[in-house]
Image (cartoon, rainbow, N blue to C red):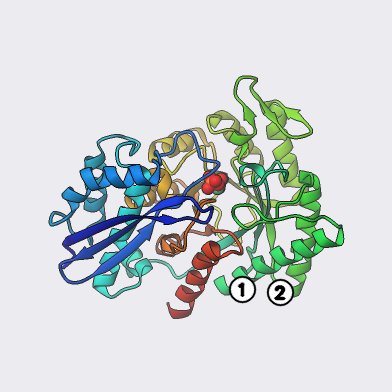
Amino acid sequence: MTLVTDVVLRRVLDSRGNPTVEADIRTDSGGFGRARAPSGASTGAFEAVELPAHEAIAAAREHAVPRLVGEVYAGDQRDVDSTLRAADGTDDFSTIGANSAVALSMAAAHVAADVLGAPLFQHLGGTFRGDGFPVPLGNVIGGGEHAAEATDIQEFLAAPVGAPSVEAAVFANAAVHETVGDLLADRDIACGTGDEGAWAPPISDSEAFAVLAAAVDRVAEDVGFEIRTGLDVAAAELYDEEAGVYRYSDEVRDPDEQAAYVADLVERHDVVYVEDPLTETDFAGFAELTATVGGQAAAGAGSTETLVCGDDLFVTNVDRLERGIEQGAANSILVKPNQTGTLTGAFDAIERAVAAGYSPVVSHRSGETEDTTIAHLAVATDAPYIKTGTVGGERTAKLNELIRIEHNA
Ligand code: PGA
Ligand code: ZN
């Protein structure tokens, strides 16, 4: 019933106006599935390779499509994904592009769900998945690689850990975003937004913290549940490899100073989530920081332990995660399907993470589309957190899908 009979690949726009890959898959029983690849700007050096969309499409048509059509069943996700790996023939999807691979992998999941007549999260998670929901981490102020002339730290996040529902959490994050805008206007700070829709003001990181804290306090009082704060330092983007230092607009920090700086931020601002506090090769530095600020136990929604999360450090790669687990490098992993190229890769990373007591955080990229697959992935795997922005159509596509899933589940 889920035998793949037709595969179409095309270029479509992403939220930055760049071309990305969209895949359509049809099956013998008339099923239809569609998915699109996202794209990063502050990409990790160890991610699977994204090719220019037209090259990825041409290569996938040549190498992957003939191995899929009439050959594999979309309902067997592992077979689809190992076929994509075999068709590519490299470790990093540099032949067909991780962008073609992930679009095909996710489209296969969508068509299989369509044939079953089940929502995607149900197909992916099965009937014994939990009934919790992922807490959305909302990027409300940002800079780094996502906006020029803004903060050094890439993302200042609202973390509505006390929210009683996805819906309440999503609206709380939107209210924090709006309140941050009001507070910036009160201070006569005119600014636009970055790639993920966060405000991108020309202020220092410590001013950004002050604004974030004021907005979070105001909204928490209003909604009546706990909202904490989070950070994505995206430290690899600040790191000067040759000099071995982190370069901020107004300061240079060596690795020890960087770790002490982040630990101090976490303590001073009661930060519940910190992503990529150090550069993507510094497993030992991560381990020291995790020992300082991270909790030992698995930290889930509502936990007061600080999550130290590896994004560029792990790149959704099980081998890198394994190394991190051995060294105690973190207690959380960011999961971006396009960093590994398949849903199987994302699932394997989540499974290994959970077994080691790491909290998986399913995530969007700065370049996105209206694709909603990650919302279903987060629900299917009982991920305690999802990072998918706060406002803007490509972000609200996922947030609204989470609300729909909660409403209908
Ligand atoms: P990216 O940023 O999609 O540009 O890599 C998101 C992140 O660093 O978490
Ligand atoms: Zn990140």
Question: Would you name the residue on which mark 1 appears?
Answer: 168
Marked residue nearer the N-terminal end (1 or 2): 1
Q: Are marks 1 and 2 in contact (CB under 8 Å)?
A: yes
Residue at screen point 79% across, 65% down: 182
Quadrant of the drawing holding the C terminus: bottom left
- Residue 113: x and y in percent read 29, 68
Q: Is mark 2 within 8 Å of ligand 1?
A: no
Secondary structure, mark 1, is helix
**Does 252 sit left or right of 169 as displayed?**
right
Q: Is residue 174 above or below residue 76?
A: below
Secondary structure, mark 2, is helix
Which picture quadrant has residue 199?
A: bottom right
**Type of the residue with mark 2:** Val
Which picture quadrant has residue 123?
A: bottom left
- Residue 399: x and y in percent read 53, 67
Query: Looking at the image, which is closer to me, 361 or 35?
Result: 35
